[in-house]
């Protein structure tokens, strides 16, 4: 059984460069004003350095206190709470902490100021002792839902031959993991509900889902309206063991012949993942659902599910083609009002050595031939578009500022001193200022990317394209489609005089 808390200390901020000043403590009296305290006659109230200590604190000690040291003053208000005899701690002196389930949390039972007086330290959970130590005590563990509760650190202090208790209590709340989850219905996906004509019933659709998932009933049929069927407004949300559940009620008043055998579908989820639960009403005493009703319902449900899955798969596979078709259909143009000159700045290895000749040719010949002459984009190629004689660093910075994209033709030899500024400047614009987007073309196979800056690895995987130099690629190939998809949307006028196949570039 825990002793009641009998100890309290008031600490004052230390004031440097005034060590010789006299320290005074005063307590405010309603009749006399500030009355200086003289702790010497009282063994219960002592002055220790800059602290006024109570051994123990009592209800009559409540009030306003004034600390004086030279010309410096500090006022305190002391509130003394009488604790419930049936509890091991005071509910008004609890520190609340929250932790996510399976994450690490700790209870640190330590009091540095009282360390020299600590005789024993005990840890209690909901007023039941769980651990004990002679000095400090530290509990560290991964949170479970059953770990939720009140943890009390009780320090037994030995002062002038008497024992006093000092208690610190923490209210630990364990929160659920809010990771996006796929909706799962509670109960079977197909439900037979036996009813009698004229009675009213409620169908409850409940599922393990996410708080923002939509849940709705589908009970409409072409040329047929069920006036006695109503969907309750709003959805009910509750949390159990850290998991979120949603439910929706469908109320059917005075069941009639139209309701019998009708399929009521409940759908929960979002645009990414969803699931459907079905209910069908049958008359009490009916041994089975009519074959034609069951068959029709199952076929419709299967066809809808298959159609939705196929549609999602097709949208994922042909996402690029669909976006390009949409751009062409509506004539979308992102370049009209941004005030920039170039659609893309091409960063490549400038020196045309034997081992980088194919990379150089790809950057200064192949890319302009396809993106400019065929698709109508405007590229910025340093050696072609910049007049010699200017400050190279300033020119590069200015050209990147005027470009909507940066195309990096990447190989192991790319990371040379000549292009490192282009890369760093482009990464700063893309990742910090967010004024330009980067397209990374892996020109030759690279087994290790450790030579790249760490920030370049933050690019999304779909913004990294691989050039297959040993295969002839037509303008309609997947590589060029993906590249145009990553370029800004604009009305393009493909050239008609260009041949369909591009020359093969060999990589040494």
Image: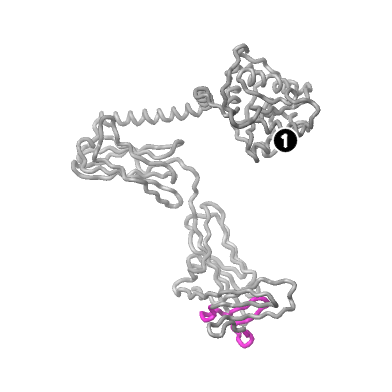
Looking at this view, is 175 or 68 the one in front? 68
- The relative height of residue 466 versus residue 100 in the rendered view (above or below) is above
Q: Is residue 294 shown left or right of residue 100?
A: left
Q: Position of residue 63 (x, y in %)?
A: 54, 78
At x 48%, y 43%, the residue is: 180
At x 59%, y 24%, the residue is: 484
- The relative height of residue 485 versus residue 261 in the rendered view (above or below) is above
Q: Position of residue 96 (x, y in %)?
A: 52, 62
Residue at image mark 1: 451
- The relative height of residue 176 versus residue 296 in the rendered view (above or below) is below
Q: Is residue 156 shown left or right of residue 209?
A: right
At x 63%, y 16%, the residue is: 472
- Where disc 1 sits, the SS reads loop
- The relative height of residue 143 versus residue 235 in the rendered view (above or below) is below
Q: Is residue 460 shown left or right of residue 129?
A: right
Looking at this view, is 347 or 168 the one in front? 347
Q: Position of residue 222 (x, y in %)?
A: 28, 30
Furthest-left residue in this view? 198
Q: Is residue 199 shown left or right of residue 437?
A: left
What range is drawn magenta here? 37-62
Q: Position of residue 476 (x, y in %)?
A: 57, 18
The scheme the figure's colours follow is one colour
Q: Quadrant of the C terminus?
A: top right
Count of labels in the image: 1
């Amino acid at each position: 059984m825990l002793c009641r808390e009998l100890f309290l200390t008031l600490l004052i901020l230390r004031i440097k460069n005034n060590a010789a000043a006299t320290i005074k403590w005063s307590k405010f009296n309603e009749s006399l004003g500030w009355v200086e305290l003289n702790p010497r006659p009282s063994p219960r109230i002592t002055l220790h350095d800059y602290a006024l200590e109570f051994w123990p604190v009592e209800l009559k000690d409540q009030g306003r206190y004034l600390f004086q040291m030279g010309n410096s003053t500090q006022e305190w208000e002391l509130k003394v709470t009488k604790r419930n005899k049936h509890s091991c701690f005071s509910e008004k002196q609890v520190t609340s902490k929250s932790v996510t389930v399976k994450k690490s949390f700790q209870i640190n039972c330590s009091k540095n100021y009282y360390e020299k007086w600590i005789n024993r330290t005990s840890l209690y959970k909901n007023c039941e002792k769980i651990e004990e130590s002679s000095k400090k005590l530290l509990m560290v563990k991964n949170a479970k839902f059953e770990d939720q509760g009140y943890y009390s650190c009780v320090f037994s202090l030995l002062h002038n031959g008497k024992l006093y208790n000092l208690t610190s209590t923490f209210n630990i709340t364990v929160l659920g993991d809010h990771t996006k989850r796929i909706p799962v219905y509670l109960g079977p996906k197909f439900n037979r509900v036996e009813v009698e004509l004229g009675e009213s019933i409620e169908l409850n659709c409940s599922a393990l889902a996410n708080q923002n998932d939509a849940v709705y009933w589908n009970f409409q049929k072409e040329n047929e309206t069920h006036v006695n069927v109503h969907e309750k407004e709003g959805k009910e949300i509750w949390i159990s063991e850290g998991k979120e559940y949603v439910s929706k009620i469908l109320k059917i008043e005075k069941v009639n012949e139209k309701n019998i055998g009708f399929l009521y579908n409940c759908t929960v989820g979002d645009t990414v993942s969803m699931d459907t639960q079905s209910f069908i009403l049958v008359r009490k005493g009916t041994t089975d659902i009519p074959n034609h009703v069951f068959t029709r319902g199952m076929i419709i449900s299967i066809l809808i599910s298959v159609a939705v899955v196929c549609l999602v798969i097709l949208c994922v596979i042909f996402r690029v083609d669909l976006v390009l078709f949409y751009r062409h259909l509506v004539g979308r143009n992102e370049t009209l009002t941004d005030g920039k000159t170039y659609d893309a700045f091409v960063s490549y290895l400038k020196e045309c050595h034997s081992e980088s000749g194919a990379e150089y040719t790809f950057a200064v010949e192949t890319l302009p031939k396809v993106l400019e002459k065929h698709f109508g984009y405007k590229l910025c190629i340093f050696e072609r578009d910049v007049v010699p004689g200017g400050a190279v660093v300033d020119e590069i910075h200015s050209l990147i500022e005027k470009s909507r994209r940066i195309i990096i033709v990447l190989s192991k030899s790319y990371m040379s001193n000549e292009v490192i500024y282009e890369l760093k400047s482009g990464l700063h614009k893309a990742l910090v200022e967010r004024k330009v987007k980067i397209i990374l073309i892996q020109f030759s196979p690279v087994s290790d990317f450790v030579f790249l800056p760490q920030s370049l690895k933050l690019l999304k995987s779909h913004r990294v394209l691989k050039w297959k130099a040993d295969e002839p690629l037509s303008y309609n190939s997947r590589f060029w489609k993906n590249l145009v998809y990553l370029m800004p949307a604009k009305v393009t006028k493909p050239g008609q005089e260009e041949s369909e196949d591009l020359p093969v570039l060999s990589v040494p």
